[in-house]
Image (tube, helix red, strand yellow):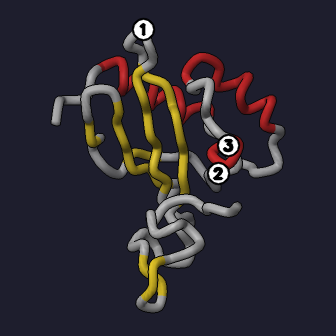
Amino acid sequence: MDKPSEALESVLERVIDLWPRSSSEAEVDIRRRLGDIAAADLDSASLKVAAKGRLRIVSGPILLKHAAKVLLSAGGDCLPCLATFAKDEHGSWRLSAMEEQCAVCFGSGINDGQLCDMCFATGWGVHID
């Protein structure tokens, strides 16, 4: 694992500053505000994750060559979020996903001795067909 770059730290701070605090905000407005720090393929489900306060970093990033993951939390009774970043073709970091910890299995991927079907056993996000 590599040391986080200043570029990744800068993008992460911008995401924290600009992230919606209400799930009622229109997707187009969120995308406009995030601008070039959001990957083009950032999905709608990621944009529905609303913090009930200012997000804060609760883990150091896990870094691979072209990807990074960071655990974030708004504290209180909020579930933590996993922010995933990817490098684009120019080597710039972009937010590629924001997933809330699964409210059924709480990140384990297991519910009642079975694979959790809410998050598809990933522990993060809600996966619905």
* Residue type for callout 3: Leu
Which residue sits at x=52%, y=67%?
Answer: 120
The image shows residue 30, relative to residue 57, as above or below, that is above
Q: Give coordinates of residue 96: x percent, y percent.
A: 52, 34
Report whether residue 126 is seen.
Answer: yes
- The residue lying toward the viewer, choosing from 98 and 14, is 98
Q: Give coordinates of residue 66: x percent, y percent.
A: 33, 27
The image shows residue 105, relative to residue 41, as above or below, that is below
Find residue 90 and name its label. 1
Provide the secondary structure element on which disc 3 rests: helix
Q: Give coordinates of residue 31: x percent, y percent.
A: 71, 28
* Residue type for callout 2: Val
- Disc 3 and disc 2 in contact, CB within 8 angstroms: yes
- Disc 1 and disc 3 in contact, CB within 8 angstroms: no
Q: Label 2 neighbourhood size at 10 Å, few (<14), some (14-19), many (20+)? A: some
For label 3, the residue is 47
Provide the secondary structure element on which disc 1 rests: loop
The answer to whether residue 126 is left or right of residue 76 is: right
For label 2, the residue is 49
Which residue sits at x=46%, y=30%?
Answer: 13
* Residue type for callout 1: His
